[in-house]
Amino acid sequence: MTDPLDEPGYLAPAQRLVVDAPPDFLLTACPGSGKTRTAGARFVVRAEAGDRVAATSYTNIGVDQIREVISSELGRTVGPESFIGTFHKFLLQYVFHPFGHIVMGCSSPHLVDAENAGDDVRLNGDNRWRVPLAGFRFRPDGSLVFCGRGLPGWSREQVTAAGSAEAATMKRRAAARGRATFDDAMYWSLRVLRDVPGVAAAVAGRFDELMVDEAQDTSELQLACLIELSGTGRLRSLVLIGDVDQSIYAFQGASPQGVYRLVADRGMRSVPLVENHRSSQLICDVAVHFCSRDRPDVAVGEHADFTAPPEIVFYDPALPTTATDQFLGRIAALGIDPMSTTVLARNNALVALLNNQAGRVGCASRPTALGRAVMALRHGTVGRHDLHAVDKIIAYAAWGEGDSLDGLDAEGRREVRNATIGLITAAPALGLPLQHWIRDAAVVLRGVTSELVAVPARRPGDVLRSAADQGDVIAGDYFKRPSPGFSARSVHDVKGATREAVLVVARARTSAYRPPEADTWTAHLRGEQVPPEHAEEQRILYVALTRARKYCAIALPTNTSPAVIDSLQRAGFLRSPIESR
């Protein structure tokens, strides 16, 4: 049987050069450049040469794609001497869990989710104004900044000033009890690397090469950890893979500029991939107007010559679903399967409107995760992520300290997984009203956790909470995931994904103080200065458009200014022949 790595055409010449490149470089990869295949192939080649390789990515999607290349496309397995996972998991496994207790002042560190981070923070000590503790994020210098949901009448800067001192005290008290959120664990990992002698050097020397995919999305805390590892001189090869034009996680502390400072400080060379194997040339030609590059990427894939031009459709601001109707009509005319397409929006509220889910009742994260796993089991599609989400619910109910399973040995994990199977198998019928379903599921949860421990740490009714305002909503209707086809998603949900066609819906003006999204997206096309806080909005549009293989469109509200429409037409968008009625 021929090794895929030896087959002509599996890797393009530029990709093969990256696979065989000497250590230490920045791979600047345009959308659709095949960076995942290239990274997976380099992992295999280096590992089979005897190197210990760690391949990381910012998102689980990126990790899964690298695994898919290694296992499914190349037919290799990953040995225990190597690592594949998110960079977050890398730091948890090699830094936080083994050494975090030293800087936290506890006996053993463990993770808690945001819901269990601690009591709310009082602003200026006033009980009338409270915000969740998890909304405060550590900076590398140990200060705190508020990044959570806004409070009416308060800016984030005001919340930071009024609550950061109390939040810092609460976080350090939690650390002394061994508790840290997933985000705080990155700060304590940084403290370990800075303050505990020998740890940074040992972790840096653990692997012969560390690959960091989606490097532009690395948070400032994770980047600071990476800088500490590099500064030891023990990191033999660092390969950063990314594209600053696809950096869309500033709200989580992403620092693409910091990545380039690391590249300069380490003296890393830059290796580009500029051939787009995903999109048509027409898509590349319009997308370039929303990134920092001067020239369009070169389309070389099977859809490079697809002739459908990017288009503009219009919708009534009061009826955004008409944009979806037009999109479906257009892709039908193009012969594109709607199940291979998606509708994207920047704002979650708009996503809900496009999915006809506005006004839906709420449901806490744990019963939602359990319900979706049960729904997936009923349809025969339950996956690893579904099972792991329920594993964490079981562990939280049994032992009460966050959702982490990292403190369990192999036998403990096996017992938890058996309890998970028992829970989702014996869960109530999904035809029940949502409130009743959650209460009945809590009874089943009590049964499976009592088989793990004599006295579960958490009451099942506290773990799986129902709400009085859930009315007559049927559980199965609530837990049903949107179809993978033309249902709406947020742009962040599809980062790293590919679709045959994409519709990006621009939100209409929602505030006198906030311009319509299309105005922000096109400000530079109209010769206006783009404020730094709006630069990411343009990158979000760039990421959305470049998910498409064959066809992309932008939906604008009918009250969009003619100047905005003209600027998009000059960039290469045409008016769709299917107009709103």
Image: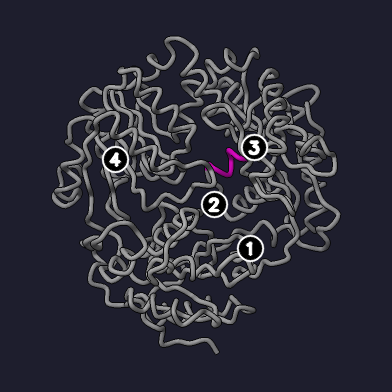
| Lower sequence index among marks 3 and 2 | 3
Q: Which mark is residue 136?
A: 3
Q: What residue lies at 26% left-to-right and 34% top-to-bottom?
A: 44
SS at badge 4:
helix
| Lower sequence index among marks 1 and 4 | 4
Report if residue 471 lies within the magenta region.
no
* C-alpha separation, residue under disc 2 versus residue under disc 1: 28 Å
Q: Which quarter of the rendering shows the N terminus?
A: top left
| Lower sequence index among marks 4 and 3 | 4
SS at badge 3:
strand
Span highlighted in magenta in the image: 384-389
Residue type at mark 2: give it: Thr
Q: Which residue is mark 2?
A: 381
Residue 402's spot in the image, x, y percent? 67, 30
Q: Which quarter of the rendering shows the C terminus?
A: bottom right
| Lower sequence index among marks 2 and 1 | 1
Q: Which residue is mark 1?
A: 349
Q: Is residue 271 above or below residue 569?
A: above
| Lower sequence index among marks 2 and 4 | 4
Q: Main secondary structure of the magenta part?
A: helix
